[in-house]
Image (tube, rainbow, N blue to C red):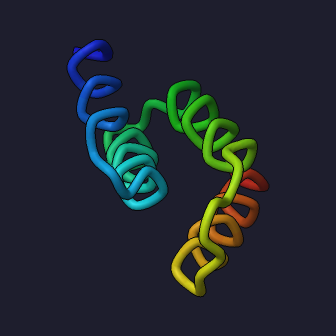
Amino acid sequence: MRNIDQFSVNSVPNRFVSRDALFEFYLRIGNKMEAKRVGEEILNLPVKIHSEIVNRIKEKIKTNFNHL
């Protein structure tokens, strides 16, 4: 399943929103290790166009890292 998830994340133009959805999915199913991996990807992903959405996603990831 991970390969399919990664394919969808990489094929969607808005990389932050799709990765955030994957992060949320892993949190919901209790897979903290994968959530942390995806969260780290999000935090390390270069921002091409700065926006409030990207800022919120990154802040949410940082906040959730305290609980992983």
In the current view of this chain or complex, which residue is farthest to the bottom?
52
Q: Nearer the viewer, residue 12 or 66?
A: 12
Tell me where residue 60 appears, x and y as whole percent. 63, 69
Determine the residue positioned at 63% across, 60% down.
Answer: 48
Of residues 54 and 31, the one nearer the viewer is 54
The quadrant of the picture occupied by the N terminus is top left
Q: Which image quarter: residue 2?
A: top left
Quarter of the image with the C terminus in it: top right
- Above or below, 63 against 19 in this view is below
Q: Quadrant of residue 61?
A: bottom right
Question: In the depicted view, which residue is nearer to us: 3 or 29?
Answer: 3
Q: Position of residue 3 (x, y in %)?
A: 29, 13
In the displayed structure, 45 sits above or below 49; it is above
Q: Quadrant of residue 14?
A: bottom left
Residue at left 73%, top 51%? Answer: 65
What residue appears at the point 67 percent right and 59 percent down from the top-left corner? 47
**Image position of 55 with respect to 15: above or below:** below
The residue located at (52%, 80%) in the rendering is 53
Q: Measured from the top left, where is residue 37 in percent x and y? A: 61, 29
Q: In the rendered view, does 29 fall on the left or right side of 45?
A: left
